[in-house]
Image: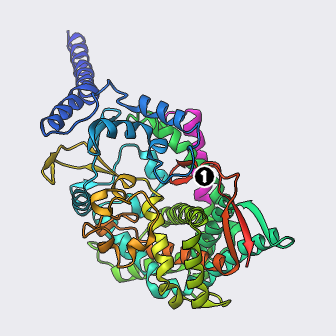
Amino acid sequence: METMTLSSVLISIFCVIIVTGLIKVVNWVWLKPKKLERLLKQQGFSGTCYKFLIGDLKDFTSMRTQALKTPMNGFSNDYFQRVEPFRHHLASRFGNDFFLWFGPIPMLSISKPEMVIEAFTKTHDIRKPKVNPVFDKLFPGLVSYEGEKWAQHRKLINPAFHMEKLKLMLPAFCDSCAEIINRWEMVVAKTGSGELDVWPDLMKLTATVISRAAFGSNYEEGQRIFELLKEQTEVTLLMLQSIYFPGRRFIPTKRNRRFKDIEDKIHTSLRAIISKRKADIEAGEAVKADLLGILLDSNSKEIQQAGNNKNRPVGMSLEEVIDECKLFYLAGQETTSTLLVWTLILLSKHQDWQARAQEEVLQTFGDNVPDFEGLRQLKTVTMILYEVLRLYPPAMQVTRYVNKDTNLGAFSVPSGALITFFLHTIHRNQESWGDDAHEFKPDRFAEGISKATKGTNAFFPFGWGPRICIGEKFAMTEAKMALSMILQRFSFDLSPSYVHAPETVMFLQPQHGAQIVLHKL
């Protein structure tokens, strides 16, 4: 009898667990999405109807794959239909503000600058998305943290990006640029001009800058890390195109095993660089004026100041330092290389602006190596870089997760929804930028960003608010240095072989390279 009773209890517990699990699954894949769909439509939002489990992922993937098979018909700065064909299709139906389905999660596309700024500032209620943990593995560290941990890491990393520290990194910028320019001069040496695809060289340039400025090493030492990060990015994008469910990343699929293998190799390489640096410091060597040296010094001081105070954070662990270094590598290299490649492409198309920038650079520096104060005074070059960031922002979209029911403008956004801001749409809003919003006109920034946007401040290439990109000044200084040194030695125009085909891998880049004809000055 007791055995029967025990068996009955176990069966009952098992049934309760199964039923509870089924209820949660049904709620996740159907009841909650349909409830959120009703709430959004009641507030006047238009969007697609929810499809069981997959949402709009199938349509998104198939339309994007088809669009990337064909380059654009001629050169145009309006490339949204090629890069985001599904969202372009929805915008043509519903306007710029609509919702679609990322699996069972609604994703609201918002284009009004004031709502974007509000979302950027409500960091407690509107946070970085946690849709798929694999994304945090690719972009770890500061960019993925929230709350107190984010504040602590931001405080520790901030000293590395102060202006006086950037000045000390200028030789690393200069040496890296000089290597690429010397190679280009060999291309044009015989005839005074020559054609080459500058995209691989610009990626190598920014990789070298990060290796030197962040770790004091040359490109060869960091090359393997960049190769691994590139492969890991490709694997991640494939993983993000399918529905994530809890625990999926632990299933030993071929893709998951490859991702983990790459992750282990990257961590091993970075751990070796960091451990060697820590050993050098402990042996009495002076702290080097690179990002890693400054970070380790800042972290060490924080740990010492914390002392025995158990209520105070005690700095970063070794694994956290590794994560921040990985973020330096990926974000620092990819974003600046894309900014530079689109700058050269657009200046090749707009020879008048190339001539104006070249005149400013030569008047400021002559044949001398660009210095920090001179770079800060480059008004025309700065206007050009801003306009490139407006038309070709490295990150095409910014996504946030609504942590709890939140008011955003006149809307009440329900907890569990995603919000996405497409910079392509916001940066071409005619109310903010005028009727010529699709045109390359750097002089719109002649009196600053506020004037350029008619007071709306609808310019977010580095984000906004408390979480604005910590590396903004680093990236802009590097881009100014590279562009200045190129303009000191070359003029350039687009090759007839160039095919205009923007695409997003993780950042916006030319799918078929950037073939440019260089002319020696």
Please give the name of the residue rendered at 65% of the width and 70% of the height, measured from the top-left corner.
208
Please give the name of the residue rendered at 84% of the width and 73% of the height, measured from the top-left corner.
189
Classify residue 99 as left or right of residue 245: left
* Relative depth, front residue between 34 and 521: 521
Q: Can you give x and y, in whole percent of width and height, for residue 166 in the image?
A: 51, 83
Q: Can you give x and y, in whole percent of width and height, for residue 401 in the image?
A: 28, 49
Q: Is residue 398 visible?
A: no
Q: Is residue 441 visible?
A: yes
> What colour scheme was applied to this rendering of the protein?
rainbow
Kind of residue at disc 1: Lys
Q: Can you give x and y, in whole percent of width and height, for residue 10 in the image?
A: 25, 19
Q: Is residue 369 magenta?
A: no
Query: For residue 36, which quarter of the picture?
Result: top left
Q: Is residue 252 magenta?
A: yes
User: Which residue matches tag 1?
Assistant: 230
Q: Is residue 40 above or below residue 306?
A: above
Q: Can you give x and y, in whole percent of width and height, for residue 344 in the image?
A: 60, 66
Q: Which residues are magenta?
A: 251-268
* Relative depth, front residue between 186 and 276: 186
In what quadrant of the picture does the C terminus appear? bottom right
Majority secondary structure in the magenta region: helix
